[in-house]
Amino acid sequence: MGELIKDGLRIDGRKPDELRPIKIEAGVLYRADGSAYVEWGGNKVLAAVYGPRELLPKHMQDPTKAVVNARYNMASFSVEDRKRPGPDRRSIEISKVTSEALESVIFTELFPRAVIDINIEILDAEAGTRCAGITAAAVALADAGIPMRDIPAACAAGKVDGQVVLDLRKEEDQEGEADLPIAIAPRTEEILLLQMDGHLTYKEFEEALELAIKGSKYVSKLQKEALRRKYKKVEEE
Amino acid sequence: MDIPEVKRISAVKKDYLIKLAKQGKRADGREFDEYRKITIERNIIKKAEGSARVKIGNTMVLAGIKLDIGEPYPDSPEEGAMSTSVELPPLASPDFEPGPPKPDAIEIARVIDRGIRESKYIKLDKLVVEPGEKVWIVFIDIHVLDYDGNLFDAGSLAASAALQNAVIPNERFGLGDNEPLPVGSPPISCTFAKFGNAIVVDPGLEEEQVAEARFTVALDENGDIRAMQKGLKGRFTVEEIKNNINRAQIHAKNIRKLLEG
């Protein structure tokens, strides 16, 4: 306590409402129908979309709409102590809320009996991986040409040293007092994903939510720039 | 692949519930801001270190607490540990299947766990047997016995009530007399479901089946927020989220009286 913010600046020199550096690239994989790569602070995340394609086995199909199946997976080498490969309870929960958040903007009714598979691989992790993953997945969905009402963007706010801040880094996440990751539909500012753990008063929550929405909107701008860059390049070729 | 455990409801039923909601009504006659009857019974499992059965309407869950001695986590050598699991056994619903926990059950368990953990309900720093070597590990196991909606709140309440009367089983481990498990003030979980333009508290089974979005918030004794989770593929506006929290603060006060009274 009292170590994470000094003279109004955070340990990496950021202001409370400042994001870590973010780099987004669309269409980075050859085989996937759509893909994206995101570097967000120390996070490196790759997302690939396959589909819409026929969902097998057939009994899993929904005759009225496509099933959206996001899978969040951490590479064993992405964290300090090697993570045992395969889904653990944390990644199963993140996969579930990520699937739900992304499905909320996809026109799934256009693809009955189909599945849209979204694979998110966390290659290097440094706090905020679920937001980086959703951000990458959203760009990959757009790159795959999946019809969506909006391109979701995600960002977290939190509290460290009693102060509401944007986009926690590892030390802030571990020693901070609260973490509030969200995903929004930037056009309407509707909430697609919201999780929180820690301790926030209602006032602090309002402040953190406003900050997280602001961060998400900036991320949204970067997502759109990345998509424009890719399709401009294709045009030039 | 996520196999939905809650089967979809007919379109007719969905239209009916949404139409009712437009008139400000719910199928079971409740107000939007009305919980079903909640009952809490404690100490019903002898072998458990603590236990409670909670009913919310026809939903019934049983929480049992067991303690064991183990190694502390490397990042918290001076603290005990806790673990929360939820089982949705086939006895509780025609839609539940046997087998390892599916994403639905894992999500419920993790949201309940965060509420308890972040409110520091269990005083983990008082659960050290030998610093750095041996600590108590508190296992919170929540069994759903009858599923009629709102397992987040029923499970959380059962876990809190069971912890409230739990003991540290020193005798069984040759460490002297049993003593009460040190706990503080419990988190109160409050869950909403949104369908059509209605947002109702304590969704029943049918309301859960038609729900587009779900929101759970865990509040501490000051009404501060300790955990939140938005679920399902629907969307909330910022105003709706804020409203939910304000509504939850009123409900949490009443539920807290049941738990502490």
Image (cartoon, rainbow, N blue to C red):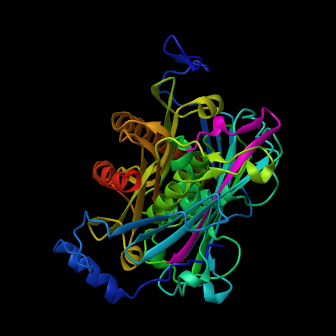
The residue drawn where x is 54% and y is 21% is: A14
The residue drawn where x is 52% and y is 51% is: B164
**Residue A188 visible in the shown view:** no
Q: Viewer-proximal residue, B76 or B43?
A: B43
Residue B173 point in image, percent of width and height: 79, 50
Question: Where A65 falls versus B52 (above or below)?
Answer: below
Instruction: Name the quadrant of the N terminus of chain B.
Output: bottom right
The residue drawn where x is 77% and y is 54% is: B172
- Which residues make up the magenta segment? B122-146
* Residue A122 is covered by the magenta coloring: no
Q: Viewer-proximal residue, A111 or B65?
A: B65
Q: Residue furthest top?
A: A7
Q: Viewer-proximal residue, B28 or A85?
A: B28
Q: Is residue A175 left or right of residue B148?
A: right
Residue A220 point in image, percent of width and height: 47, 45
Which secondary structure is most common in the magenta stretch?
strand
Task: Name which quarter of the figure residue A226 lies in.
Answer: top right
Q: Is residue A196 left or right of residue B3?
A: left
Residue B189 point in image, percent of width and height: 43, 55
Question: Where A179 falls versus B151 (above or below)?
Answer: above
Residue A132 point in image, percent of width and height: 60, 45
Q: Viewer-proximal residue, A201 or A52?
A: A201
* Residue B142 is covered by the magenta coloring: yes
Task: Name which quarter of the figure residue B18 lies in.
Answer: bottom left
